[in-house]
Amino acid sequence: MSKLTFLGTASAVPAKDQQNTHFVVQSGLRTILVDCVGNPIVRLQEAGISPLSITDLILTHFHPDHVSGVPLLLMDLWLMGRNNPLRVYGLRDVIDRMVKMLDLYDWQTWQGFYPVSFYRISDQPETLIAEAEMEVGVFPVCHMIPGIGIKMVLPDGGFCYSSDTSPCSIVTEMALGLEILIHEATGEGVGHSSPEQAGRIAEQASVKQLYLIHYPPGTNEDQWVASAKKAYSGEVILAKDLMTIEFPRESSQ
């Protein structure tokens, strides 16, 4: 069984009970963290996931509400005795900036530090992982700065994640044939989407379920769902912190 856990669902400004958007996917031998903010060790523990189990980290774009927790995660894993390598993926500029940020902490002088491999992604659709338990692809989206969306095909299902983006035809293309679309719903504006716009993308992609994410704390759930349903005939779910999606689709909470 594979599982996705939403570690945070808020847009740029979080709240006490709603962290910035990031999530983790567990499938086979891989535990993939998508974006990293706040206090990642604590949030993973709250979700019942061992921080040391993280095998891969994908960074969607270099905005603070998506990458600010990376130095803390890397340091804490080291202090917790990690030995296994960690793979970090992102656009070339994202990785270059992240390395510069880590250099401010003199991270390469930390004695006994575990291996970290950085993978610089092009601005074209690309496959990052192709294994029996999962296939992970990324693709460019339409945000204020260069960013990537993610498509994961798991043994018993799959999903597409828009990341931060205004309505973008490639999200529709990548979501086709999948059961679930996880789409940002910050509100209509430059580089972002409204719930209704997210619903329209979900309808065009013919997915069975739409999860709205990256929305402002205090959002009226009924209003956001109803707005998406104006353009989408399937099931709409407002993603919430620590909610899970299991594959195959046996339950969600």
Image (tube, rainbow, N blue to C red):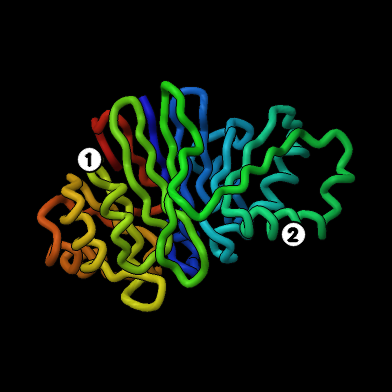
184 and 169: which is toward the camera: 169
Quadrant for the C terminus in the image: top left
44 lies above or below 37: above
Residue type beneath disc 2: Met
Label of residue 177 in the image: 1
Q: Percent position (x, y) of residue 12? A: 49, 69
Extreme bottom residue here? 189
State the SS at label 2. helix
Q: Percent position (x, y) of residue 42? A: 59, 47
Q: Earlier in the sequence, mark 2 or mark 1?
A: 2
- Label 1 crowd bin: few (<14), some (14–19), many (20+), radius 10 Å: some
Residue type beneath disc 1: Gly
Label of residue 151 in the image: none
Count of numbered badges drawn on the protein: 2
Residue at 37% over, 55% down: 162
25 and 95: which is toward the camera: 95
Label of residue 101 in the image: 2
75 and 149: which is toward the camera: 149
Quadrant for the N terminus in the image: top left
28 lies above or below 4: above
Tell me if 226 is positioned left or right of 249 in this view.
left
Tell me if 136 is positioned left or right of 238 in this view.
right
Residue at 57% over, 65% down: 63
Residue at 58% over, 45% down: 89
How far is disc 2 from disc 1 in space, using C-alphas?
A: 39 Å
Q: Percent position (x, y) of residue 66? A: 54, 59
State the SS at label 1. loop
Task: Give the mark toward the camera: 2 or 1.
Answer: 1
Tell me if 37 is positioned left or right of 81 in this view.
left
Residue at 40% over, 39% down: 4
- Quadrant for residue 157, please give it: top left
49 lies above or below 206: above
